[in-house]
């Protein structure tokens, strides 16, 4: 088994070395290795609420303080987490390869903390606050926030700078991700089930554009049968070996 893994690692290392433009798409799996829960599904309850009940425009309109209490709690969990070897390996690849684009579905900011310079954050960042009146956005890493719900200097109510259920991705962010994958010759898909759209469309786009697709995941996903190579295991174990 180890020999097979080593053969696959060597093959993907060769693809990375020859890539003109490599991309990586990361999901909740890489953050889970840093101890950050997914906040969804089994075990995802906060008080008596599920994430799907709180991360919506409707929930925020009904009770902004409640939604902000949940996000303030989440920010506290994320603040106590550390970027893991997988995050650091991706930052190392970015520094070594001629062109490397990191796209993430995660909002925790751990890629930036590990040294990734310009990750495309499809779903925004939990560390950004956006005004519902003037639309100005700014970073705020205080934990806990001093006042809930927070307000902008203009007096408007601030919301988390993330994409909620029922909202579309920021057009510019999605355009940048789409164009990066379309121009890539290698895509690493890491720690994501590859079923949530529109991010799930990126791997098929890469294949259609002629790129190789490599899946790095602890378990099988709906994408597994359609990739060029699968590296089965934790991102924090596989990626450092790829980056050697």
Image (cartoon, helix red, strand yellow):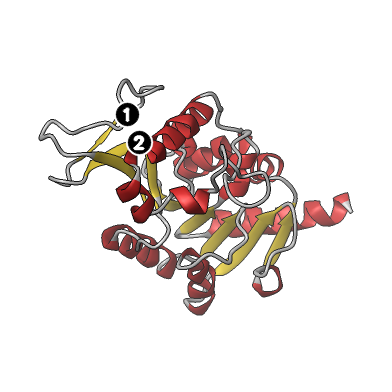
Q: Residue 77: image x %, image y %?
A: 53, 29
State whether residue 203 is above or below residue 144.
below
State whether residue 208 is above or below residue 43.
below
Q: Mark 1 and 2 residues: CB-CB less than 8 Å, in contact?
A: yes
Tag 2 residue: 65
Q: Secondary structure at mark 1?
A: loop
Q: Residue 102: image x %, image y %?
A: 45, 50
Q: Residue 240: image x %, image y %?
A: 65, 39
> At 78% across and 56% down in the image, what residue appears?
7
Can residue 5 be spotted in the picture? yes
Q: Residue 14: image x %, image y %?
A: 63, 57
> At 38% across and 50% down in the image, what residue appears?
59
Res. 192 image quadrant? bottom right
**Foreground residue among 48 and 136:** 48
* Pointer 1 or 2: first along the chain: 2
Q: Which mark is residue 148?
A: 1
């Amino acid at each position: 088994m180890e020999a097979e893994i080593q053969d696959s690692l060597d093959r993907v290392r060769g693809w990375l070395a020859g890539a003109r433009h490599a991309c990586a798409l990361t999901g909740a799996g890489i953050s889970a290795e840093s101890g950050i829960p997914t906040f969804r599904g089994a075990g995802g309850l906060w008080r008596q609420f599920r994430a799907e009940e709180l991360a919506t425009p409707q929930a925020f309109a009904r009770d902004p303080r409640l939604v902000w209490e949940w996000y303030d709690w989440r920010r506290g969990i994320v603040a106590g987490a550390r970027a893991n070897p997988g995050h650091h390996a991706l930052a190392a690849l970015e520094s070594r390869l001629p062109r490397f684009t990191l796209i993430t579905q995660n909002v925790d900011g751990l890629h930036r903390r590990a040294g990734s310079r310009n990750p495309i954050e499809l779903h925004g960042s939990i560390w950004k606050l956006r005004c519902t009146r003037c639309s100005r956005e700014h970073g705020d890493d205080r934990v806990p926030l001093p006042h809930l719900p927070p307000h902008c200097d203009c007096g408007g109510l601030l919301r988390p700078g993330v994409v909620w259920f029922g909202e579309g991705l920021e057009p510019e962010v999605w355009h940048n991700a789409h164009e990066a994958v379309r121009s890539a010759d290698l895509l690493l898909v890491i720690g994501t089930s590859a079923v949530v759209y529109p991010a799930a469309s990126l791997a098929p786009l890469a294949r259609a554009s002629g790129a190789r697709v490599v899946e790095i995941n602890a378990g099988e996903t709906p994408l597994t049968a359609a990739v060029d190579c699968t590296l089965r295991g934790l991102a924090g174990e596989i990626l450092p070996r790829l980056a050697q």
